[in-house]
Amino acid sequence: MKLSRYLPVLDWGRRYDVGKFGEDLMAAVIVTIMLIPQSLAYALLAGLPPEAGLYASILPLVAYAIFGTSRALAVGPVAVVSLMTAAAVGEIAETGTMGYAAAALSLAFLSGLFLVIMGVFRLGFLANFLSHPVISGFITASGIIIAASQLRHILGVEARGHTLVELGASLSASILDPHWPTVIIGVSAAVFLFWVRSGLKPLLLALGVHRRAADILTKAGPVFAVAVSIAAVAVLDLGAKGVALVGAVPQGLPPFSAPSFEPELLMLLIGPAMLISIIGFVESVSVAQTLAAKKRERIDPDQELVGLGAANLSAAFSGGYPVTGGFARSVVNFDAGAATPAAGAFTAAGIALATLFLTPLLANLPVAVLAATIIVAVLSLVDLAALKRAWEY
């Protein structure tokens, strides 16, 4: 048995081309710019402090680069898994407590362990039994619930609930009395981000900007929103006017953190961990196979299980929470020219530098801007046309 089957990084000559590291580095720069605001936003969605999103985007990326088989898949926090994390851990501990963070680490550990076991026993074929309409419906419903859950941050009001009905009832009680400075910031950020997705690139191309530069500027849209909102808070002292801010974010590399191994906690989390593992794997392998086919390459679903499992295990010991391959960032990674798995390692280095030097700047970041980032990201996952086709069938 070849050791490189379970440790693909040993097959250096086939997987890595030093001559293409320049392309990988450029792709990593673009993905890093996109990933920083997304990581902060998804940590908020999971009910965790913002630094947890950054931590979950460092070692997991390195682990996947070592064990995974896709050259373009970008691993890290994603919206659906963040929502599932909040739903699972929220039943066990209060948001913002040490117990909540410890449970999130344990959830990542169980998810990683389950994925590795599936990979070792070559169970990747099980993904074939999950139909596309089921996965599409699950992701569409999750996207709608996620977007609804973030409206409270856009409106600056209190709201509770995990279902669409509960959220709707909670929001309707306070929607007529929003916090207007927060509304202005949140709505402006959302409108800007929606416009960036569809209108910025054509405008830049019409102005004669090179296509690659236009791509970079378009993907950096959330960074512009973050920078402008931070500046507005500093100049107008919006924090004193009641606008909710991210607050102090710890500066430095991810600390070593051990998940809790209490039997009672693990028994409560094993069901959600299995579900997160399966959903995350199906999403990841679908994206990885699609991108690999465009270059006439193949991935190994069983080894993908091991790669994703290693990523989750590393998140469990570095202050993160469950991760998987993200659709949007993987497509950006592919389009930006990622040629080898080294692009993921370079992206991890970029996020690490951000945690070392940029986190003090994030204290004045409005929570409403992160909520707008989440809403714009998840609504792109909503596929109502698929529901219509299923209904007609």
Image (cartoon, rainbow, N blue to C red):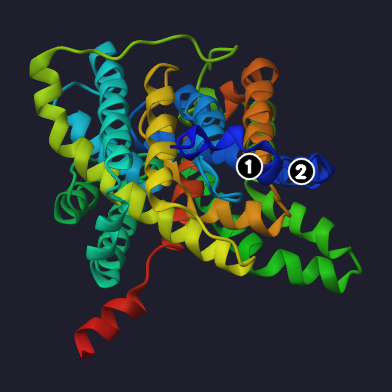
Quadrant location of residue 13?
A: top right
Which quadrant: the C terminus? Answer: bottom left
Which quadrant: the N terminus? Answer: top left
Can you give x and y, in whole percent of width and height, for residue 156 in the image? 39, 39
Residue at figure coordinates x 18%, y 43% from the top left: 161
Give the residue pinned by disc 2. Answer: 17
Determine whether, in the image, residue 213 is placed left or right of residue 92: right
Q: Nearer the observer, disc 2 or disc 1?
A: 2
In the rendered image of this protein, does residue 303 appear above or below residue 3?
Answer: below
Residue 99 seen anywhere in this rendered image of the structure: yes
Can you give x and y, in whole percent of width and height, for residue 108 in the image? 32, 28
Q: Which residue ends up furthest to the bottom in the rendered image?
A: 392
Give the residue pinned by disc 1. Answer: 341
Residue at figure coordinates x 60%, y 11% from the top left: 252
Q: Give amino acid for label 1.
A: Pro
Label 1 SS: loop
